Image: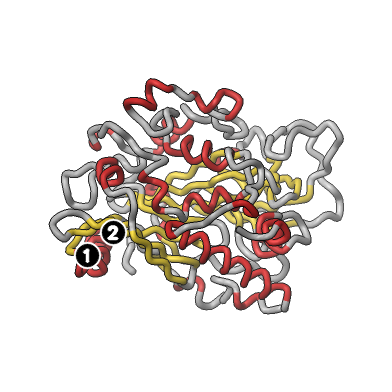
Amino acid sequence: MISQKLNDQITRIGPDTPAGAVHRMYWQPAALVDELTDDEPRLPVNLLGERLVLLRQGEGYILATRQSTPDEPPAHHPARDDIRVVEGGPVYPVVEKKGVFFAYLGTGEPPAFPNFDCFRAPDSHVFAFKGLWECNWLQALEIGIDPSHASFLHRFLEDEDPADSYGKQFRDKAAHTDMPMTQLLREYPRPDLEVEETDYGLKITALRHMAHDLTHVRVTNQIFPSAICIPMSREMIITQWHVPVDDETCYWFTMFTSFRQPVNKELMRAQRLKEHRLPDYAPLKNRTNAYHFDPDEQETQTYTGMGPDINVHDQWAVEGLGAIQDRTREHLGRGDAAIVRYRLMLRRAIKALETGQPEKLPMQDRALTPQIIGPLSNDAIGDTGNWVAASKQMDTERRAGCPWDATV
């Protein structure tokens, strides 16, 4: 558990807050490119506690300060009526990357983008989407760096045919075996964890020791300050940002990146629009309708009884903690190793900014950041005594078959 003062320090993200200052040192997803159309050249964007508007400027885009009015909708709602730009207010640079507009709200020269797989893959191999969660960004991020939760929160009591599961997480076969991932997660629920700091954040390795002296290795990553990179299947990875709208609301922005085959964007978008409404990308299952909880389904099909979409499971878990989780009453355990390490990194970053040392933050070296590639995010099975080599070999083989340069 931590003090209320520390909890406020690491969760609040408005202007002039410590964690907000850290977030402003990085490019943040602001909107999907699909949201800005020829018919609507201005898009309200609420980001890091600021009310902004995305505008075209020449050949590019900017974020300008938007005037708030007493009858304005909630901060996450992209109402387009009566948009008024504050004259003389801050203007922030915007770049487009693989279907997402990224904005830099900090001072000075923006940092370079790392050469992550989601950025260097061709447009044909990347699909972007987003969704709204009614909670603080930190608890949204922390569920993504808890590898153990998949064995419980996302437990499926029946294993469907992976051939019918395109675009769904945990529905592939485990590594090079015929065992469904859902079965592996169910039968080996308590992994050993190894967490190490990297140039981009954290590398998190979950080891599920199986029969016959085999180990399943699942490598996920925390990308500082508020993103994760995880395997979706043997073919795809997910890079997901947990973007603060304000202290009590956030969007997840996800880039689905395929190594070998182009992504079926129409199918993946249709899958996700079955669970979200437009224009605010709010989930159709939410606390107002009990996330469509079905006790019969819970008895025979899923741990949550809330359908097969794992985003709904995560949403229920993080929103159920309240708008801002009360960490003064938590009790972290061995499965929370990555969460503990991340909070230490965030506190070091806050202190570095407060003492005028921004270069100590991850990925703030303008020369070195573009050389950061990967990161490794995959599932592998190998001999327990040689799981490191097995993980690297499977990642190398997957990348070797790429039609684009995925070498690391």
Looking at the picture, tell me which residue is in the foreground, 288 or 364.
Answer: 288
For image coordinates 24% across by 57% down, the residue present is 209
Q: Residues within 10 Å of mark 2 (few under 14, many from 20)?
A: many
Residue receiving disc 1: 390
Vertical order, 360 against 392 (above or below): below
Vertical order, 154 against 86 (above or below): above
Pinpoint residue 99: horizontal percent, then vertical percent: 51, 47
Residue 54 in sight? no
Compared across the picture, whether 308 is left or right of 59 comes to: left
For image coordinates 29% across by 42% down, the residue present is 186
For image coordinates 19% across by 61% down, the residue present is 382
Compared across the picture, whether 123 is left or right of 284 comes to: left
Residue type, label 2: Val
Q: Mark 1 falls on what kind of element? A: helix
Compared across the picture, whether 242 is left or right of 298 comes to: right
Q: Which of labels 2 and 1 is toward the front? A: 2
Residue receiving disc 2: 217
Pinpoint residue 205: horizontal percent, then vertical percent: 36, 62
Looking at the picture, tell me which residue is in the foreground, 312 or 364.
Answer: 312
Do labels 2 and 1 touch, CB within 8 Å?
Answer: yes
For image coordinates 52% across by 28% down, the residue present is 291
Residue type, label 1: Ala
